Amino acid sequence: MGELDEGEFLIDAEHDHAEQPEHAAPEPQRWRVRARKPLTPEAVAAECEPGSVDAARVLDLHESMKQRARLYAAHLERLATFFREDPDVQGVIDEADIIAAKIATGLRCTCRQAQSQVLDAHRAVEWMPRTFENLRTGDLPEAWHQHLLRQIRRLEEHQVRSLDAHLAGVELASVSKTTFERQLKYGIALATAGTLPTPPSESRNVEIVDVNTETGVASLFVSGPIPEITALAHRLDVAARTVQKAQRAALESDAEGPLPFDIDEDLAARGRAHSLATLRYAILTHSLLDLDPVEETRKPYKLLVTVPVTTMLGLDDAPAMLEGMTPIPAQQARELAAGERTWTRILTDPITGAHLPVTAESYSPPQQMRLQLRLRHPVCAVPGCDRRTAIAAEDDHLIEYDHDHPDQGGQTSLWNLHRLCWAHHAQKTAGLIDPSRDPRDDPARGDGTTPAGPWETTWDLGDSVLTRSHEHTDLATPHMVEALQRAWRTSQRHHEDAVRLHEQEKARPVEERVAEDRALATRKAYPGRSGSRDARRIIPPGASQEEVAPPF
């Protein structure tokens, strides 16, 4: 027996000589890792006086932690059982997205989140049964197990099973969190030993990350082989320096006409070229991408901005809507519209904001109808799916279109159409999901009593799993316009206040600001101290002596 660190011992164990499948990864040598002392009720409340109220509360918290672990384990078991016994997927891990739409309704989450939970449950219950038993009994905290799942999502099945064998030798009911994380890392290293690293070519990716809706800022994350990323950064830097040099030359010569990459058209007033950081961003976001030798698509991506005609005429400041989801201030909408030559008119109900119907006489919807469908369905129509339909989506007939007898099949109308992402459109075609609408809502009845939308859709997700959804409704109703205008005025006022305070701070002596910031940092780092002597105390006007003097 050899001591590892405080509270942890190792006991050598024999190799497991059970027969293994040919070419299977060898089982790692198993160790017994146990805590110095079992985690008994006395050990849990060791820092409290025996029999005291604090000791009872600590034990109650410990028991609630174990109960949460058991409930979490039951949740995973239900997901794994549902997935294993669903006839549409038959326990095939690659078909987890099919069952996601069914359980997303019950979990009140998106399809992607449901799919992630299904995969985690399958790995936990089927691939790591011995570790899962500790979770089921409440001996493995829920947070520890979720940390484990995050670490194994990229591992193959035989590697996960090998890790499960390693953790089976760890006394998970008593070891510390540090020991658990150390053994998890060690077990993964053993399970993946000899595995070749992922080729850099498989790491190529571009995605939008860190979206902050409050500040309106997002980041573009680009990953790939080091030489390619380095070359991209070098080309971008060379381009930025070239443009910066051109800007300086144009400013010095008082050249007439537009200046290069003068995005905000303020270079002449600034009198100096943009910084390299600003130019790198400008070049990335305002340059045409070279598609040679591939011919550019004849139908380029369109960004839909819906602007009320009263806003365009300057009669009011009702906001525009970006892709039917995000409000845009009236002034910004007018600036966007100023450079456009062609406009498409889409009639809307003045009270509900719903788009009024258009007609079609063929299988393919006309351009006007496709635009309205994009506004009605900014994301996939399947409940829980959050894939945007601006690209990689398809218009789908709820009632199938009869190509041989168009008058007898489903019509090409707004009532009979919705937009689905490519994955869910394939599932609908395969009969795995079946949407329907109440025929009484079909405006084709011609009785003049049916609304222009939004309409309710009933979804049969298989095995009598039913849920309902409504089409997206335009937010720019009179009531919402008023609320958005109030919010915009409030935002403008806060911005003006922030600018004024910023100017006041700039006017103060630098030494004073530095001293206050250092004192504030000291108080945050050492909250137990009374604070520096020069820290200012702010006393409200008219405060009484009792309010000023501390009550102790």
Image (tube, rainbow, N blue to C red):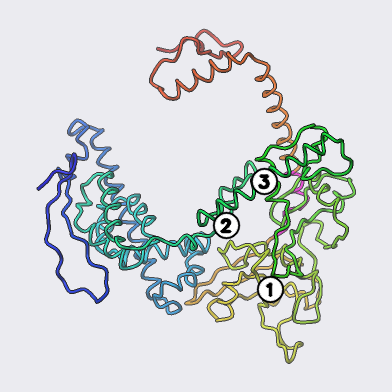
Q: Read off the magenta span.
A: 473-484
Return the residue nearer the eye: 273 or 253: 253
Q: Which residue is mark 2?
A: 206
Q: Position of residue 248 (x, y in %)?
A: 77, 37
Q: Tell me which corner region of the image, top left, top right, bottom left or bottom right, holds residue 190.
A: bottom left
Amino acid type indicated by mark 1: Asp
Say above or below: 253 vs 192. Answer: above
Is tag 2's residue or tag 1's residue first in the polypeptide sequence?
2
**Quarter of the rendering containing residue 386:** bottom right
| Local crowd size for mark 2, using a 10 Å CA cut-off: few (<14), some (14–19), many (≥20) | few
**Measured Cα–Cα span from mark 2 to mark 1:** 27 Å
Crowd class of label 1 (few under 14; some 14 to 19; many from 20; radius 10 Å): some
Element type at mark 1: strand
Residue bearing the label numbered 3: 281
Identity of the residue drawn at 68% across and 41% down? 278
Is disc 2 placed on a helix, strand or loop?
A: strand
Q: Does the magenta portion include 474?
A: yes
Query: Which amino acid type is shown beneath numbered disc 2?
Result: Val
Query: SS for tag 3?
Result: helix
x%, y% of residue 478? 78, 50
> Does label 3 or label 1 sit earlier along the sequence?
3
- Percent from the top left, x then y, of residue 428? 58, 77
Please give the label number shown on residue 497.
Answer: none
